[in-house]
Image (spheres, rainbow, N blue to C red):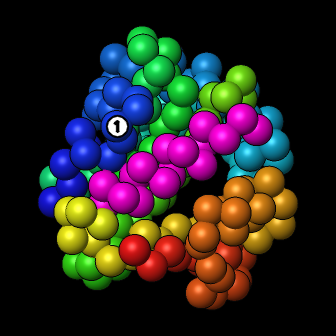
């Protein structure tokens, strides 16, 4: 089980709800590069669906659709699944930063704090998938110590904790 309050010592972390959709949409629409490689562009409805979308064998108690806040400002969204695809792995289904905070080390700081928190909770790996042709995402995750584990339409990556 993931304790979201242990995912950052720097930023405020909380579960996002349908009341947050407008903030999430604003953050999402600022990320034009992401949607060049991963269409379609986000809508209110697609965000609401993402908040409930689950991989096979998981239920909503395993899903943590969280916001990372600097004071009251939403600066990142993360979709984190506990114990997927196995019990020792946390799966990041989405990580998106506010465009104004990109390129400043903030995203890497969030991922490092998240990795440290997950390790303390007993997780041994973080897994995710990257659009294979998105150089920005690919570079970001490699810089944050993720290694390629599979390469098809999406590049599967993981980080050993």
Seen at 66% across and 41% down, the residue is 105
The quadrant of the image that shows the C terminus is: bottom left
Displayed quadrant of residue 50 = top left
Seen at 67% across and 28% down, the residue is 101
Seen at 48% across and 54% down, the residue is 112
Residue interval drawn in magenta: 103-118
Q: Where residue 147 sits: x, y (%)? A: 62, 79
The answer to whether residue 131 of the structure is visible from this angle is: no
Query: In terms of depth relative to the viewer, which is nearer, 61 or 119?
Result: 119
Query: In terms of depth relative to the viewer, which is nearer, 13 or 145?
Result: 145
The quadrant of the image that shows the N terminus is: bottom left
Query: In terms of depth relative to the viewer, which is nearer, 116 or 86?
Result: 116
Seen at 48% across and 37% down, the residue is 77
Displayed quadrant of residue 104 = top right
Determine which residue is flagged by label 1: 9
Decide: is 44 above or below 143.
Answer: above
SS for callout 1: loop
- 136 left or right of 47 in image: right
- 110 left or right of 138 in image: left
| Label 1 environment density (alpha carbons within 10 Å; few <14, some 14–19, many ≥20) | few
Decide: is 105 above or below 132.
Answer: above
Q: Is residue 54 magenta?
A: no
Q: Where residue 76 sits: x, y (%)? A: 52, 34
Count of numbered labels shown in the rendering: 1
Query: In terms of depth relative to the viewer, which is nearer, 22 or 91?
Result: 91
Q: Is residue 112 magenta?
A: yes
Q: Residue furthest bottom?
A: 150
Give the main secondary structure of the magenta stretch: helix
Q: Where residue 16 sits: x, y (%)? A: 33, 30
The answer to whether residue 36 of the structure is visible from this angle is: yes
- 34 left or right of 57 in image: right
């Amino acid at each position: 089980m993931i304790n979201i309050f242990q995912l950052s010592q720097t930023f405020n972390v909380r579960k996002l709800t349908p009341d947050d959709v407008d903030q999430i949409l604003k953050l999402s629409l600022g990320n034009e590069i992401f949607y060049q490689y991963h269409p379609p562009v986000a809508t209110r409805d697609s965000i609401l669906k993402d908040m409930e979308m689950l991989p096979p064998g998981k239920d909503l108690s395993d899903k943590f659709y969280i916001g990372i806040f600097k004071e009251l400002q939403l600066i990142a969204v993360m979709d984190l699944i506990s114990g997927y695809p196995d019990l020792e792995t946390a799966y990041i289904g989405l990580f998106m930063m506010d465009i104004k905070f990109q390129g400043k080390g903030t995203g890497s700081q969030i991922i490092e704090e998240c990795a440290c928190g997950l390790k303390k909770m007993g997780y041994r790996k973080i897994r995710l998938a990257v659009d294979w042709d998105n150089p920005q995402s690919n570079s970001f995750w490699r810089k944050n110590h993720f290694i390629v584990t599979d390469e098809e339409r999406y590049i599967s990556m993981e980080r050993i904790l």
